[in-house]
Amino acid sequence: MNETDFLSQYDPGAFQRPSVTVDLVLLGLRENRPSVLLVRRDQHPHAGRWALPGGFVGIDESLDAAAARVLREKAGMGEAHLEQLYTFGAVDRDPRMRIISVAYLALLTEQAFDAAHRAMPALLPAAIHVPWAGEAGGPVDVLSPENETLTLAFDHAEILAMAMLRLRGKLDYSDVAFALLPDLFTLRQLQDLHEAVLGTALNKPAFRRRQLDKGWLAATGAYESGTAFRPAELYRFRRLMAD
């Protein structure tokens, strides 16, 4: 029997098929706090709870195409850099049926984060509080703009915790932090970002020396405006200068 014959006789119903969804972690820094955009579920299960924007993957749709569609339809964003975060497949993660979710992570500047919220007012900008330190992992707290703790639908709190763990793990050795900053930023803004994600204060001289020694920062010679104090110099991520 050749492959053509095998496929002509193959019964796709011989095995149960789980459904597949994509969930988007749209992460940004808002008022110096890690924040995520959430949608309120209007259908059961978990009707009324807040959740990550997500949706089912069509039978003829790739994972990336499904993520881009959800980004447009539920987050009102034409484009964003989405990368696969992790696959969540606990048997009982959804009470309807066996559903496997592929989570995507998008890091947004504060401007892009706020623009998405303005474009889709139904999106909730929720702050993320990470009570665990270092790389220990564990649950995170999600807070409404009124500082009330939210209970997320399904395992979305676990997905969010994984996103924060991944971000923390990559913060010091990769250029991931710059995706959360505007094109021009001060060293204070860069340190504020690191402290917000890590949840701890950093020594200012040591932090600045370490960041400058990496060679990723290029001084622009320009200074911030509209400040009551001595304006700080603006820097640019060096790779952007080459683009």
Image: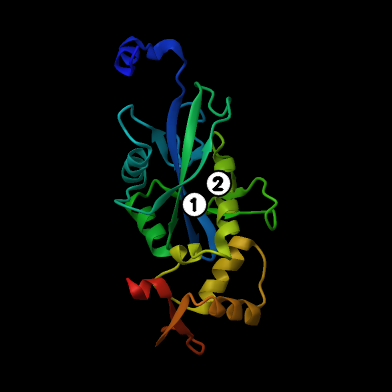
**Apparent side of residue 203 relative to residue 122 in the rendered image (left or right):** right
- Distance in Å between CA atoms under marks 2 and 1: 9 Å
- Crowdedness of circle 1 by 10 Å Cα count: few (<14), some, many (20+)? many
What is the quadrant of the N terminus in the image? top left
Q: Looking at the picture, which amino acid does disc 2 mark?
A: Leu
Relative to residue 70, is residue 18 drawn left or right? Answer: right
Q: Amino acid at mark 1?
A: Val
Which numbered dot is residue 36?
1
Query: What's the residue at 35%, 58% (across, down)?
Result: 115
- Along the viewing direction, whichever of 30 and 77 lies nearer the viewer: 77
Q: Is residue 147 above or below residue 242?
A: above
Res 235 → quadrant: bottom left
Q: Position of residue 42 (x, y in %)?
A: 43, 32
Mark 1 residue element:
strand
Relative side of 119 to 101, left or right? left
Residue holding disc 2: 160
Give me the residue at 40% from left, 50% from top. 82
Whether residue 234 is situated above or below residue 114 in the rendered picture: below
